[in-house]
């Protein structure tokens, strides 16, 4: 693509050393520059792309977009913009031909539930016979293609490329998680959303947003800024059970909106008339504007009922039939790492869940307690270099609901695991547990899981919380392979082997 064509999409403050040239690609990562690329220098939270302009030029960058005044060779076209991230989004969308305009994009935002809602929507749309895909925390999927993503919502150049691939493979509908970071950092600016869902808002990422109000302001932009500019005319779907959902309703009350709730109140557009939850799953009846949905699914708990109704609302508003929604729910496989059951021969109910916020952990624990297990044993930790305020709160919630807690490492990153654990334990004590008796401490996550499983007896529920689908652990600045599900399966198989060995002697 000619530089002149590409740059016409970009409002720039200053142009220097302009000369026509052919652009072979766009990147913000100097390590990915190839000859003929346009390099966009982004000031990041850890490193500043402006410091790598020389490196990008050395690798063959043909032109540079920047927001700071940096000296460049006289033969390199330079464009100074007000905001490099906005520029990257604009350029990436133009480069790929605005692929989101050719598809129906449902943006899902909120603290918890995004992944499950997107997975359900993909299932509903597919059951209707539409070519569907999803993008989010557990990766992307479309046309039998799938892969991992480093961020819930990738950087704009990556997301536009992925949407382009989806479009080229005939994808018609995409359910996409939209994180607060992505909104704040302009990754989703030039995606044409057709619909948006708000699941809930609870304390998370406050090390970045600094307050719940700023966190809410970021999420709100999906509905007040991105959805309108994308031409989205379909209904917004809002969780009426959430206080911030109610606040959002006040902001967008003049727009087409459907509300949903897990309480049997006919004033909302979608609500359950009745439901039953067990260790086998959920079943019940949901009232919708299209009629009653009778459903049965392997998903467990009231929080998944909320996710189910949110996805149903979006699907019904797009005229997916209730019959197809019911069929999809019956066949729906549990989302990886979301109350994912680990089968075993010991009569144990072992679950791995991604819950890593106080509210998410509380909801999972409540769900499991309501299923009346013999005992509830919880293995959990907190991530390093993240919001420290939630550590004692998570400890308190675990102590309130669990019979035995094993406190361990999550992703400690550059913090010492013992330091993180020391900030969890006051909450454990506040919740009424005695350290060393009802609460055990084991910083090594593998040993902690083994300890919990060895303590468990038939009829007990063991919850391994915090990492869910993740197959790595971040120690220092390195990622090592570690998968809670794999670890639990191996330990349970080892326990079977030991039992058989003891019997054979």
Image (cartoon, rainbow, N blue to C red):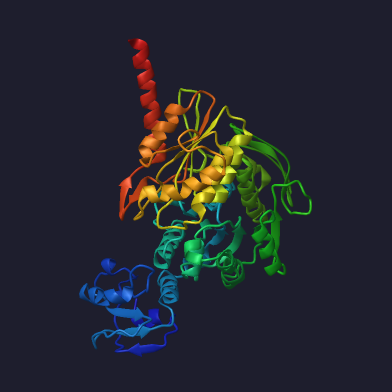
Please tell me how many numbered marks the rendered image carries. 0
- Vertical side of 174 occupied by 251: above or below: below
Q: Residue at x 54, y 52 (%)?
A: 118
Q: Position of residue 164 (x, y in %)?
A: 43, 63
Which residue occupies the foreground of this view, 124 or 360? 360
* Residue 462 visible in this rendered orientation of the protein: yes
Q: Position of residue 227 (x, y in %)?
A: 59, 68
Quarter of the figure with the C terminus = top left
Horizontal side of residue 31 vs 145, given as left or right: left
Q: Residue at x 63, y 55 (%)?
A: 314
Which residue occupies the foreground of this view, 365 or 161? 365
Which residue occupies the foreground of this view, 135 or 83? 83
- Vertical side of 67 occupied by 296: above or below: above
Q: Residue furthest top?
A: 505
Give the quarter of the image for residue 498.
top left
Quarter of the figure with the N terminus = bottom left
Q: Residue at x 59, y 58 (%)?
A: 201
* Residue 116 visible in this rendered orientation of the protein: no
Which residue occupies the foreground of this view, 124 or 102? 124
- Vertical side of 333 occupied by 10: above or below: below
Horizontal side of residue 87 vs 399, given as left or right: left
Q: Position of residue 114 (x, y in %)?
A: 54, 53
Q: Residue furthest right?
A: 266
Q: Position of residue 95 (x, y in %)?
A: 40, 72
Give the quarter of the image for residue 111.
bottom right
Q: Residue at x 41, y 69 (%)?
A: 96
């Amino acid at each position: 693509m000619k530089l002149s064509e590409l740059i016409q999409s970009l409002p720039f403050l200053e142009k220097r050393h302009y000369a026509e040239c052919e652009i072979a690609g766009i990147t913000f990562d100097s390590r990915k520059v190839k000859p003929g690329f346009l390099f966009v220098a982004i000031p990041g939270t850890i490193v500043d792309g402006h410091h790598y302009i020389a490196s990008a030029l050395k690798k063959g960058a043909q032109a540079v977009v920047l927001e700071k005044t940096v000296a460049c060779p006289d033969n390199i076209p330079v464009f100074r913009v007000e905001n490099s991230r906005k520029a990257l989004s604009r350029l990436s969308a133009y480069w790929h031909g605005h692929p989101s305009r050719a598809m129906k994009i449902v943006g899902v935002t909120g603290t918890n539930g995004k992944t499950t809602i997107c997975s359900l929507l993909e299932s509903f749309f597919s059951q209707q016979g539409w070519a569907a895909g999803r993008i989010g925390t557990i990766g992307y999927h479309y046309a039998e293609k799938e892969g991992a993503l480093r961020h819930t919502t990738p950087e704009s150049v990556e997301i536009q490329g992925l949407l382009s691939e989806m479009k080229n493979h005939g994808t018609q509908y995409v359910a996409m998680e939209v994180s607060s970071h992505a909104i704040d950092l302009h990754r989703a600016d030039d995606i044409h959303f057709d619909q948006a869902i708000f699941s809930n808002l609870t304390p998370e990422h406050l090390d970045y947003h600094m307050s719940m109000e700023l966190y809410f302001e970021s999420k709100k932009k999906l509905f007040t800024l991105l959805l309108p500019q994308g031409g989205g005319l379909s209904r917004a779907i809002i969780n009426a059970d959430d206080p911030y959902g109610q606040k959002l309703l006040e902001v967008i009350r003049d727009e087409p909106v459907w509300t949903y709730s897990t309480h049997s109140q006919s004033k909302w557009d979608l609500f359950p008339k009745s439901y039953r939850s067990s260790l086998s799953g959920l079943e019940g009846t949901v009232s919708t504007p299209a009629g009653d949905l009778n459903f049965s699914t392997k998903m467990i708990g009231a929080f998944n009922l909320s996710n189910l109704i949110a996805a149903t609302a979006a699907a019904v508003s797009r005229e997916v039939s209730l019959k197809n929604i019911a069929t999809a729910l019956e066949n729906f496989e549990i989302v990886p790492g979301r109350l994912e059951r680990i089968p075993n021969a010991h009569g144990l109910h072992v679950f791995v869940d991604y819950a890593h916020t106080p509210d998410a952990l509380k909801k999972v624990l409540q769900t499991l307690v309501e299923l009346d297990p013999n005992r509830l044993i919880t293995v959990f930790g907190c991530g390093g270099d993240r919001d420290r305020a939630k550590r004692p709160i998570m400890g308190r919630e675990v102590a309130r609901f669990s019979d035995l807690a094993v406190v361990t490492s999550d992703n400690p990153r550059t913090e010492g695991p013992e330091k993180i654990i020391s900030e969890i334990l006051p909450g454990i004590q506040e919740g009424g547990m005695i350290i060393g008796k009802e609460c055990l401490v084991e910083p090594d996550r593998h040993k902690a899981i083994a300890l919990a499983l060895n303590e468990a007896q038939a009829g007990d529920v063991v919850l391994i919380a915090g990492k869910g689908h993740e197959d790595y652990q971040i120690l220092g600045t390195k990622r090592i392979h570690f998968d809670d599900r794999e670890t639990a399966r191996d330990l349970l198989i080892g326990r079977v082997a030991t039992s058989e060995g003891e019997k054979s002697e």
